[in-house]
Amino acid sequence: MPIDTIAPSALAAGDFLGRIFVFDDYGALFSLLSQSIVAGAVLALIGGFIGTFVMMRDGSFAVHGIAELSFAGAALFLFVGLDVITGSLVGSIAAAAIIGILGARASHNSSFIGVLMPFGLGLGILFLSLYQGRSANKFSLLTGQIVSVDAAQVSEMVIGAVVVIGGLLAVWRPLTFASLDPDVATAKGVPLRGLSMVFMLLLGVSVALSVQVVGSLLVLALLITPAAAAIQLTASPVKAVVLSVVFAELSTVGGIMLALAGSLPISPYVTTISFLIYIVCRVIAMMRRRLTGSGRISAQENQEEPATSRVH
């Protein structure tokens, strides 16, 4: 068929899909960027673990606030010519420490976090405006870029994973208790403020590492969405962590493998897969509630039927 007879909309759709999925030399790319896949798997493990506690503690807003300061720290270090990952870590830990000091639960500090977010974003934009280097470096801080990760960065991520997961396991029981029922935990003598500080510092490390995958603007897709999907399916903290890790791995590793076959940044792939997983889990939860409700109604009708029959 001559190309001039093809509808412009069809050409546009083909060009769009061609940018998203380009599987030429995919095997060579997969082998060349295998370290990126390993790094994504490590970060997904971190996000799946800590994301469950973020949801239990209603700390989604805190994640966003920490991400903005992480972005500001990374932009500052990029501007002065230092390591971007270190700058991201410094910004995240500073924000996490401030939030942790102010209160035991991040939900009580929403006004402060709302002030912190635009401040961090404004600083980041300022430093990026002053930076005269490659524009791709600026863009990657916002949308993520893991395809250029090297062995040293993978080692840093593994160390970060050991610190975060080891810290969570060390405070698992009191942190779960304090997250699910803080009032009773306080009455039992659980040190809520100390636990909050430990958790926020671990969260800061997790955010700093996750920004490398999906960027500061979309970090919620790695630390929140998998856990939010998991709690749709189970109320057990242990099962929620396992499901959250599985969903995070599917989103991150799957997104990286799709990104290798396209010309777009990794973040659209990761966020789309993560969102679709959440939608499926939400639908399953709704169907369960309807079936449970129908079962209860039927049971009540069966219990009431003998009484009504006796009246007749």
Image (cartoon, helix red, strand yellow):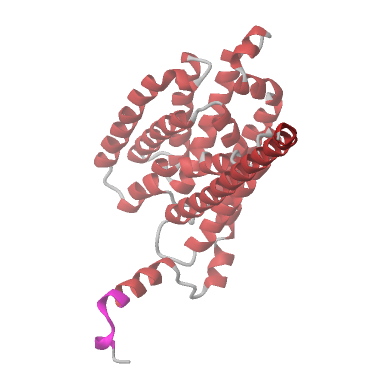
Above or below, 31 against 162 in this view is below
User: Which is the main secondary structure of the residues drawn in magenta?
Assistant: helix
x, y percentage for residue 198? 59, 22
**Which quadrant of the rendered structure holds the N terminus?**
bottom left
Taking the image as shown, residue 4 lies to the left or right of residue 201, namely left
Residue drawn at (48%, 67%) of the image:
261
Residue drawn at (26%, 46%) of the image:
132
Q: Nearer the viewer, residue 117 or 186?
A: 186
Above or below, 277 against 261 in this view is above
x, y percentage for residue 245? 63, 44
Image quarter of residue 72: top left
Residue drawn at (30%, 32%) of the image:
123
Q: Is residue 180 visible?
A: yes
Q: Is residue 156 visible?
A: no
The question of residue 4 being in magenta is answered with: yes
Q: Which residues are magenta?
A: 3-10
x, y percentage for residue 154? 58, 48
Above or below, 141 against 69 in this view is below
